[in-house]
Amino acid sequence: MTDSESASRVDLVPLEPLGRGGFTDHKAQVLSFQDGEQRFVWGLHKDTDQLWYLEEDTAREWRAHVKQFVICPVPGCEAQLTTAHRTTKRDGLVHLNKDGGHTGESIFHSQGCAVIENWLSTNYPNSKVKREEYTNAEGERRADVLITSPAGDRVAFEVQYSPLTSDAWRTRHESYRRQRIADVWLFGHTSKQLRFDRGGFLSLNPTHRAVIAAGSPVMFINPEQRAIGIATSNEWIDDGSATLRSSATIEVWDQFLRASLSIAPLEDFRPSRRGIASDWLSQLYGQTKDLRDRNEASRRHTVETQQREVAAAQAELKAWIFKRRPQQEQIRHQFATVQRWNRSDALASINAYFGGNLRDRIDSNGDAGPGTNALVRWQSVVYFDLVAGRSREFGVREAFAAIKARGVNMGQPDAFKLIAIHLHGLVDLGFLDRTDGYGQYPRFVSTEEGAWR
């Protein structure tokens, strides 16, 4: 038994697909993969207990031999068989006593086990290969097919056509792990296991997802074609470039969304310490890991960049707060001593605060002298009593109350309307946020920009 999982890694170059083309070709290939004959082609020689295979177009030639020596390989059934020659479909084995009572699932399951047993016995004659083999003296598990290498390494192959819950699968998988047996699950190629979603991709069920979560690809078997299908997905290469993320993908085995089927002959595979391997599958493992490592590194870089940006923004904000807080307190203190607004210390301090960069926060109503803007007094009160350095929610009534408390007479019959228009203007400029969901009575709170910049 060999193990090739340590094959050299590829540089994120998409693998050559196995039996895949465009979307239409892929769906046609999957449907072809599902088109297996529901016939017996494998029997069991009743004297030697060895598998016996009926070649195509040999039904008449082997009929007498089959009747005398070949029995049904389905466990528990030793019914005598005969052959059937068909002109439109493949020759096959049939029970002399009608159909033997087997369901289609049991027929496919038996065929799958027979194919795996024959493949292993033929290619690994120095290993012990046995079907329906108990894994320990207590009979904890009975593998469909168990191969034991001369070194004692064991791989259990399970052919699963019937439905199986994810919990039942985990129980069996954990049992194999406790016994240090690699388990390979080959799901059936019929619609009970292999389905399409509405988008035309494979629809992987919860049990398939549990297999992926446990660290193995989801694989399907078609006994008649002696083929294995592997569910793969294309994942974006993430190196921080939006262009590459939208155009470059790599084939991976560990995703179940938008999955497709890569199909290869059974003879391309071999048992391994991981369970099953092939040159292509080993590259797929390595490529998936490389992509995961690369995307994780990119993610870490992005997170670290964001953390640095946040730290820089926090440091910048801290510097602004350190600068602005005493200025704001000074202006609020000076509001209490205003006698002539156009010549007041408060107005001079506000002009110095903005440094000529008002950004429409407060309107100007004339020239108060060289180098001084005669800013609208009531708007200045609103900004420095409710916005600058503040974090408490307020509304139009609170703004009017603040203006009145500073001894300012707006002299307008529609003062509330003017205040509301002004506050909504500060929202549009990014200095305030609305907190009321745009209800009938608007509420506002300072943004970081409005409070400190």
Image (cartoon, grey):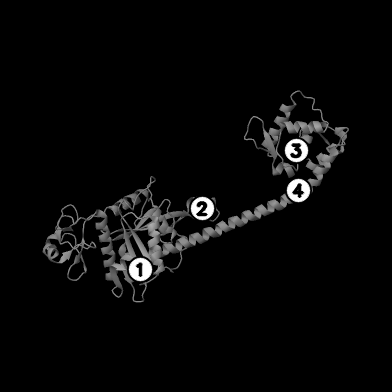
Give the mark nearest the N terminus, 1 or 2.
Answer: 1
Give the mark nearest the N terminus, 1 or 4.
Answer: 1
Give the mark nearest the N terminus, 3 or 4.
Answer: 4
Residue depicted at x 75% and y 26%: 415
Residue annotated with mark 2: 244
Compared with 315, 55 (above or below) is below
Q: Along the horizontal axis of the image, is 96 left or right of 333?
A: left
The total number of labels drawn is: 4
Disc number for residue 155 = 1
Percent of width and height locating residue 63: 12, 62
Q: Secondary structure at mark 2?
A: helix
Q: Tag 3: residue type? A: Leu
Label 3 with label 4: CB-CB less than 8 Å: no
Q: Secondary structure at mark 4?
A: helix
* Disc 1/disc 4 C-alpha distance (Å): 67 Å
Is residue 453 shown to the viewer in this render? no
Q: Secondary structure at mark 3?
A: helix
Are there few (<14), some (14-19), or many (20+) residues within 10 Å of tag 2?
Answer: few
Is residue 164 shown to the viewer in this render? yes
Compared with 445, 46 (above or below) is below
Percent of width and height locating residue 409: 81, 28
Residue annotated with mark 4: 321
Give the mark nearest the N terminus, 1 or 3.
Answer: 1
Give the residue at the far front of this rendering.
138
Q: Secondary structure at mark 1?
A: strand
Are there few (<14), some (14-19), or many (20+) residues within 10 Å of tag 1?
Answer: many
Q: Tag 2: residue type? A: Leu
Residue depicted at x 30% and y 54%: 33
Residue annotated with mark 3: 386
Q: Nearer the viewer, mark 1 or mark 4?
A: 1
